[in-house]
Amino acid sequence: MEVYVIRHTAVAVEKGVCYGQSDVSLANTASQDMKAVLAKLPDDFDQVYSSPSSRCARLAKQLTRNSALEIRPDLMEMNFGDWENCKWNDIDQILLGNWMNDFVSTKTPSGESLEMLYERVNAFIAMLRTKDLNKVAIVTHAGVIRCIWAIILDIPLQHIFKISVDYGSGIKINLNKDSALDQIKHFSSDSSS
C-alpha cells in the first residue's frame, strides 16, 4: 500500500513556544501553503487519516475527494502536559534539563514520553498493515512523522530529531504486511518551515 504521511502546514505560533497537542491556528498563509502541498499529492486516496488537531484536519478534509476521513487520536502530537503553550525558555530549566537528558523515556509533567508517543504510533502502523487499501494519506505532526521514520527504518528514538520535518512536507511509504519489504521516500512542499 502507498502511504503518504504529511505534516500540517505552518502555524500562527510564536517561535520558541511548546504547543504539542494544543489546538493552535494555522498561519495566514494556510490557503497558499495547502495548495502547494496538494499540488504534490495524488487525488485518489482510498482512505485519509488525520490527527484531531484542526491544523491537520483542515488539510485532511481537502484530500478526501473520493475517500473517507477518519480522525485518529493516536496521530496527535506528543502531549507536553504542563508545558503546553509555554515558551521553552520559561519552563523550569532544571525540569527541562532532566527531561532533555532522557527525553525518550522521561514523561513531561502531566504529559507523555517519546516512548509513549512511539507506542501509539506503532500500534496505528500495525493496524494499517492489516488494511486492504491501495493508497492512504495521513495528516499529522512532526513528532508522529519522526516516529514513523523510526518504525520503518528501525532506528533508535534518540536519533529521530536528526530528521528534518518541515511544515507541509512528508514521506511516501510503500507499506507491506512484511515490514522487511517497506520502502520510504521523502517529498516536500514549497511552504516555509
Image (cartoon, grey):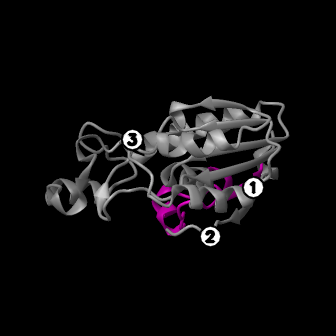
Marks 3/2: CA distance? Answer: 24 Å
Which residue does the image show at 83% across and 43% down from the upper left?
44
Q: Which residue is mark 1?
A: 41
Circle 1: element type: loop
Task: Tell me the tag on residue 190.
Answer: 2
Circle 2: element type: loop
Against 136, residue 9 (above or below) is below
Which x, y percent locates residue 77? 45, 45
Which residue does the image show at 78% across and 52% down from the upper left?
182
Taking the image as shown, residue 118 lies to the left or right of residue 130, namely left
Kind of residue sitting beneath label 2: Asp
Q: To which quarter of the image does residue 191 belong?
A: bottom right
Kind of residue sitting beneath label 3: Asp
N-terminal label among 3 and 2: 3
Marks 3/1: CA distance? Answer: 25 Å
Q: Which residue is mark 3?
A: 23
Which residue does the image show at 29% across and 58% down from the upper left?
17
User: Is the C-beta separation of discs 1 and 2 under 8 Å?
Assistant: no
Asked if the magenta segment contains residue 159, the reply would be yes
Quadrant location, the N terminus: top right
Camera-side residue of 91 and 97: 91
Camera-side residue of 14 and 164: 14
Q: To which quarter of the image does residue 91 belong?
A: bottom left
**Neighbour tally class for label 2: few under 14, some 14-19, many 20 plus, Cα within 10 Å:** some
Camera-side residue of 27 and 48: 27
Marks 1/2: CA distance? Answer: 13 Å
Taking the image as shown, residue 7 lies to the left or right of residue 152, namely left
Kind of residue sitting beneath label 1: Leu
Q: Which residues are magenta?
A: 151-174
Against 123, residue 158 (above or below) is below
